[in-house]
Protein backbone atom coordinates (compact mmCIF):
# COMPACT_ATOMS: atom_id res chain seq x y z
CA UNK A 1 0.00 0.00 0.00
CA UNK A 2 1.43 3.43 -0.99
CA UNK A 3 2.14 5.87 1.89
CA UNK A 4 -0.47 8.35 0.68
CA UNK A 5 -3.07 5.58 0.45
CA UNK A 6 -2.24 4.33 3.95
CA UNK A 7 -2.57 7.90 5.26
CA UNK A 8 -5.96 8.31 3.58
CA UNK A 9 -7.17 5.06 5.19
CA UNK A 10 -6.01 6.15 8.64
CA UNK A 11 -7.62 9.57 8.18
CA UNK A 12 -10.89 8.01 7.08
CA UNK A 13 -10.92 5.68 10.08
CA UNK A 14 -10.28 8.59 12.42
CA UNK A 15 -13.10 10.70 10.98
CA UNK A 16 -15.84 8.13 10.24
CA UNK A 17 -17.38 5.09 11.85
CA UNK A 18 -17.33 1.96 9.65
CA UNK A 19 -20.99 2.39 8.73
CA UNK A 20 -20.55 6.12 8.14
CA UNK A 21 -17.50 5.53 5.96
CA UNK A 22 -19.41 2.96 3.91
CA UNK A 23 -22.34 5.31 3.37
CA UNK A 24 -19.91 8.05 2.30
CA UNK A 25 -17.85 5.86 -0.04
CA UNK A 26 -20.73 3.82 -1.50
CA UNK A 27 -23.42 6.48 -1.56
CA UNK A 28 -24.11 6.00 -5.27
CA UNK A 29 -24.53 2.25 -4.87
CA UNK A 30 -26.81 2.65 -1.85
CA UNK A 31 -28.88 5.31 -3.62
CA UNK A 32 -29.28 2.94 -6.56
CA UNK A 33 -30.40 0.13 -4.24
CA UNK A 34 -32.95 2.44 -2.63
CA UNK A 35 -34.31 3.73 -5.96
CA UNK A 36 -34.50 0.31 -7.62
CA UNK A 37 -36.14 -1.32 -4.60
CA UNK A 38 -38.61 1.55 -4.25
CA UNK A 39 -39.66 1.35 -7.90
CA UNK A 40 -39.95 -2.45 -7.93
CA UNK A 41 -41.90 -2.50 -4.65
CA UNK A 42 -44.27 0.20 -5.88
CA UNK A 43 -44.91 -1.68 -9.11
CA UNK A 44 -45.64 -4.86 -7.15
CA UNK A 45 -48.01 -3.03 -4.80
CA UNK A 46 -49.86 -1.33 -7.65
CA UNK A 47 -50.05 -4.53 -9.69
CA UNK A 48 -51.30 -6.64 -6.77
CA UNK A 49 -54.66 -4.90 -6.73
CA UNK A 50 -54.67 -4.76 -2.91
CA UNK A 51 -56.49 -1.80 -1.37
CA UNK A 52 -53.54 -0.51 0.65
CA UNK A 53 -55.41 2.39 2.24
CA UNK A 54 -58.27 0.26 3.55
CA UNK A 55 -55.85 -2.43 4.74
CA UNK A 56 -53.63 -0.02 6.66
CA UNK A 57 -56.50 2.02 8.12
CA UNK A 58 -59.27 -0.36 9.18
CA UNK A 59 -62.33 1.48 10.42
CA UNK A 60 -64.68 -0.02 12.94
CA UNK A 61 -67.79 -1.50 11.38
CA UNK A 62 -69.76 0.39 14.01
CA UNK A 63 -68.42 3.75 12.89
CA UNK A 64 -71.54 4.62 10.93
CA UNK A 65 -71.09 8.32 11.69
CA UNK A 66 -67.77 8.46 9.84
CA UNK A 67 -67.52 9.69 6.26
CA UNK A 68 -64.26 8.79 4.51
CA UNK A 69 -62.78 11.06 1.86
CA UNK A 70 -59.64 10.76 -0.21
CA UNK A 71 -60.24 7.36 -1.79
CA UNK A 72 -59.09 8.37 -5.30
CA UNK A 73 -56.23 6.45 -7.00
CA UNK A 74 -53.77 9.32 -6.44
CA UNK A 75 -53.95 8.90 -2.67
CA UNK A 76 -53.43 5.15 -3.00
CA UNK A 77 -50.43 5.71 -5.29
CA UNK A 78 -48.83 8.24 -2.94
CA UNK A 79 -49.33 5.95 0.03
CA UNK A 80 -47.87 3.06 -1.94
CA UNK A 81 -44.85 5.24 -2.75
CA UNK A 82 -44.36 5.92 0.97
CA UNK A 83 -44.44 2.21 1.75
CA UNK A 84 -42.10 1.40 -1.15
CA UNK A 85 -39.58 4.07 -0.15
CA UNK A 86 -39.50 2.68 3.40
CA UNK A 87 -38.81 -0.82 2.05
CA UNK A 88 -36.07 0.61 -0.16
CA UNK A 89 -34.47 2.47 2.73
CA UNK A 90 -34.49 -0.66 4.89
CA UNK A 91 -32.78 -2.72 2.19
CA UNK A 92 -30.22 0.03 1.59
CA UNK A 93 -29.35 -0.05 5.31
CA UNK A 94 -28.93 -3.83 5.18
CA UNK A 95 -26.68 -3.53 2.10
CA UNK A 96 -24.62 -0.79 3.77
CA UNK A 97 -24.12 -3.02 6.81
CA UNK A 98 -22.99 -5.90 4.62
CA UNK A 99 -20.57 -3.69 2.68
CA UNK A 100 -19.12 -2.34 5.92
CA UNK A 101 -18.54 -5.89 7.17
CA UNK A 102 -16.86 -6.84 3.90
CA UNK A 103 -14.67 -3.78 3.41
CA UNK A 104 -13.72 -2.73 6.95
CA UNK A 105 -11.72 -5.06 9.19
CA UNK A 106 -13.06 -3.24 12.26
CA UNK A 107 -16.46 -4.85 11.69
CA UNK A 108 -17.38 -8.36 12.86
CA UNK A 109 -21.11 -8.86 12.58
CA UNK A 110 -21.03 -12.17 14.45
CA UNK A 111 -20.08 -10.32 17.64
CA UNK A 112 -23.46 -8.56 17.66
CA UNK A 113 -25.60 -11.41 16.31
CA UNK A 114 -27.56 -12.07 19.50
CA UNK A 115 -28.39 -8.37 19.93
CA UNK A 116 -29.48 -8.09 16.30
CA UNK A 117 -31.77 -11.11 16.67
CA UNK A 118 -33.22 -9.64 19.85
CA UNK A 119 -33.72 -6.32 18.05
CA UNK A 120 -35.70 -8.13 15.33
CA UNK A 121 -37.89 -9.82 17.97
CA UNK A 122 -38.53 -6.56 19.84
CA UNK A 123 -39.35 -4.84 16.54
CA UNK A 124 -42.07 -7.39 15.83
CA UNK A 125 -43.41 -7.07 19.38
CA UNK A 126 -43.34 -3.27 19.13
CA UNK A 127 -45.25 -3.30 15.85
CA UNK A 128 -47.91 -5.51 17.45
CA UNK A 129 -48.26 -3.15 20.42
CA UNK A 130 -48.35 -0.12 18.13
CA UNK A 131 -50.99 -1.70 15.93
CA UNK A 132 -53.19 -2.39 18.95
CA UNK A 133 -52.84 1.22 20.06
CA UNK A 134 -53.66 2.62 16.63
CA UNK A 135 -56.62 0.28 16.19
CA UNK A 136 -58.04 1.63 19.45
CA UNK A 137 -57.39 5.17 18.26
CA UNK A 138 -59.12 4.57 14.93
CA UNK A 139 -62.19 3.06 16.61
CA UNK A 140 -62.80 6.18 18.69
CA UNK A 141 -63.40 9.10 16.36
CA UNK A 142 -63.57 11.56 19.27
CA UNK A 143 -60.18 10.41 20.49
CA UNK A 144 -58.89 10.55 16.94
CA UNK A 145 -60.14 14.12 16.67
CA UNK A 146 -57.53 15.14 19.27
CA UNK A 147 -54.71 13.81 17.07
CA UNK A 148 -54.75 16.42 14.36
CA UNK A 149 -56.68 18.29 11.69
CA UNK A 150 -54.98 16.38 8.89
CA UNK A 151 -56.82 13.21 9.93
CA UNK A 152 -60.25 14.49 11.03
CA UNK A 153 -61.33 17.17 8.56
CA UNK A 154 -64.68 17.89 10.17
CA UNK A 155 -66.22 16.79 13.44
CA UNK A 156 -69.58 17.45 14.98
CA UNK A 157 -72.63 15.90 16.60
CA UNK A 158 -73.76 14.51 13.24
CA UNK A 159 -70.51 12.67 12.62
CA UNK A 160 -67.03 13.19 11.28
CA UNK A 161 -65.25 13.46 7.95
CA UNK A 162 -61.88 11.72 7.94
CA UNK A 163 -59.04 11.58 5.43
CA UNK A 164 -58.36 7.96 4.53
CA UNK A 165 -54.73 8.47 3.55
CA UNK A 166 -53.99 10.13 6.89
CA UNK A 167 -55.67 7.23 8.68
CA UNK A 168 -53.60 4.79 6.65
CA UNK A 169 -50.38 6.63 7.55
CA UNK A 170 -51.27 6.43 11.23
CA UNK A 171 -52.37 2.82 10.90
CA UNK A 172 -49.11 1.65 9.33
CA UNK A 173 -46.31 4.01 10.28
CA UNK A 174 -47.11 4.52 13.98
CA UNK A 175 -46.75 0.75 14.60
CA UNK A 176 -43.53 0.76 12.56
CA UNK A 177 -42.25 3.70 14.65
CA UNK A 178 -43.10 1.85 17.88
CA UNK A 179 -41.29 -1.21 16.54
CA UNK A 180 -38.23 0.85 15.64
CA UNK A 181 -38.23 2.43 19.09
CA UNK A 182 -38.45 -0.97 20.76
CA UNK A 183 -35.65 -2.40 18.62
CA UNK A 184 -33.20 0.51 18.74
CA UNK A 185 -31.63 -0.20 22.16
CA UNK A 186 -30.70 -3.77 21.21
CA UNK A 187 -29.69 -2.70 17.71
CA UNK A 188 -27.37 0.01 19.04
CA UNK A 189 -25.70 -2.39 21.45
CA UNK A 190 -25.30 -4.93 18.65
CA UNK A 191 -23.85 -2.27 16.33
CA UNK A 192 -21.27 -1.32 18.95
CA UNK A 193 -20.30 -4.94 19.67
CA UNK A 194 -20.05 -5.63 15.93
CA UNK A 195 -17.80 -2.60 15.44
CA UNK A 196 -20.25 -0.68 13.25
CA UNK A 197 -20.51 2.26 15.67
CA UNK A 198 -18.51 3.62 18.62
CA UNK A 199 -19.60 3.07 22.21
CA UNK A 200 -19.56 6.77 23.03
CA UNK A 201 -21.23 8.97 20.44
CA UNK A 202 -20.36 12.58 19.73
CA UNK A 203 -22.83 15.45 19.57
CA UNK A 204 -22.36 15.41 15.79
CA UNK A 205 -23.37 11.74 15.54
CA UNK A 206 -26.38 12.29 17.79
CA UNK A 207 -27.38 15.22 15.64
CA UNK A 208 -27.31 13.07 12.49
CA UNK A 209 -29.46 10.42 14.15
CA UNK A 210 -31.91 13.05 15.44
CA UNK A 211 -32.15 14.54 11.95
CA UNK A 212 -32.81 11.10 10.46
CA UNK A 213 -35.56 10.38 13.01
CA UNK A 214 -37.25 13.77 12.47
CA UNK A 215 -37.09 13.26 8.69
CA UNK A 216 -38.62 9.80 9.07
CA UNK A 217 -41.46 11.18 11.18
CA UNK A 218 -42.07 14.12 8.84
CA UNK A 219 -42.23 11.94 5.73
CA UNK A 220 -44.33 9.13 7.18
CA UNK A 221 -46.95 10.99 9.22
CA UNK A 222 -49.96 13.17 8.39
CA UNK A 223 -49.03 16.88 8.21
CA UNK A 224 -49.88 17.98 11.75
CA UNK A 225 -47.80 18.18 14.93
CA UNK A 226 -49.69 15.61 17.05
CA UNK A 227 -49.37 13.00 14.30
CA UNK A 228 -45.70 13.90 13.86
CA UNK A 229 -45.19 13.34 17.59
CA UNK A 230 -46.91 9.93 17.43
CA UNK A 231 -44.38 8.79 14.82
CA UNK A 232 -41.31 10.60 16.19
CA UNK A 233 -41.49 9.94 19.94
CA UNK A 234 -41.05 6.11 19.97
CA UNK A 235 -37.79 6.10 17.93
CA UNK A 236 -36.41 9.03 19.96
CA UNK A 237 -37.25 7.19 23.19
CA UNK A 238 -35.59 4.02 21.92
CA UNK A 239 -32.50 5.95 20.87
CA UNK A 240 -32.27 7.59 24.30
CA UNK A 241 -32.61 4.22 26.05
CA UNK A 242 -29.93 2.76 23.80
CA UNK A 243 -27.51 5.59 24.54
CA UNK A 244 -28.12 5.26 28.27
CA UNK A 245 -27.58 1.50 28.05
CA UNK A 246 -24.26 1.99 26.25
CA UNK A 247 -22.89 4.84 28.33
CA UNK A 248 -24.10 3.87 31.81
CA UNK A 249 -24.78 0.15 31.55
Image: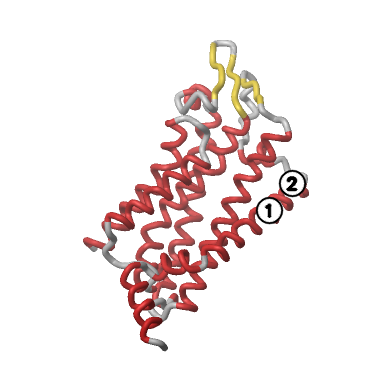
Point out the tag, 2 or 1, that comes first from the N-terminus.
1
Q: Tell me: 78 left or right of 185.
A: right
> Which is nearer the eye, 144 or 13?
13
Q: Is residue 183 visible?
A: yes
Quadrant of the snapshot with the N terminus:
bottom left
Task: Name the residue at 40% across, 48% down.
Answer: 211
133, 248: nearer the viewer: 248
Q: Which residue is mark 2?
A: 46
Neighbor class of circle 1 (other Cα within 10 Å; few <14, some 14-19, many 20+) is: some
Q: Is residue 169 left or right of residue 231?
A: right
**Residue 233 appears at what percent x and percent y?**
39, 42
Q: Measuring 31% from the left and 67% from the top, which residue is drawn there?
A: 198
Frontmost residue, 98 versus 144: 98
Question: Against 235, is 155 above or below?
Answer: above
- State the SS at label 1: helix
The location of residue 11, given as percent across then percent down, is: 33, 74
Q: What secondary structure is found at the residue carrying circle 2?
A: helix
Viewer-nearest residue: 184 or 32: 32
Quadrant assignment for the C terminus: bottom left
Does residue 110 show up?
A: no
| Residue 39's disc number | 1
The mark lying in front, picked from 2 and 1, is 1
Q: Residue 21: horizontal and vertical position, in percent?
A: 42, 68
- The relative height of residue 70 versus residue 211 in the rendered view (above or below) is above
Measured in 3D between alpha carbons, the distance from the residue under mark 2 to the one under mark 1, in whole angstroms, is 11 Å
Amino acid sequence: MAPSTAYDVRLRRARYTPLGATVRDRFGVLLGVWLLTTVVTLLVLVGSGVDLLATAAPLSSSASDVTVVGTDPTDALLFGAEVASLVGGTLALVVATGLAARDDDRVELAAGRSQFLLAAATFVAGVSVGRTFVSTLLRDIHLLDTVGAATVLESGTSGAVVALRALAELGLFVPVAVGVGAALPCFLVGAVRAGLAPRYTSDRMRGFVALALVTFAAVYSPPDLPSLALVAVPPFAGFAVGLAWLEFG
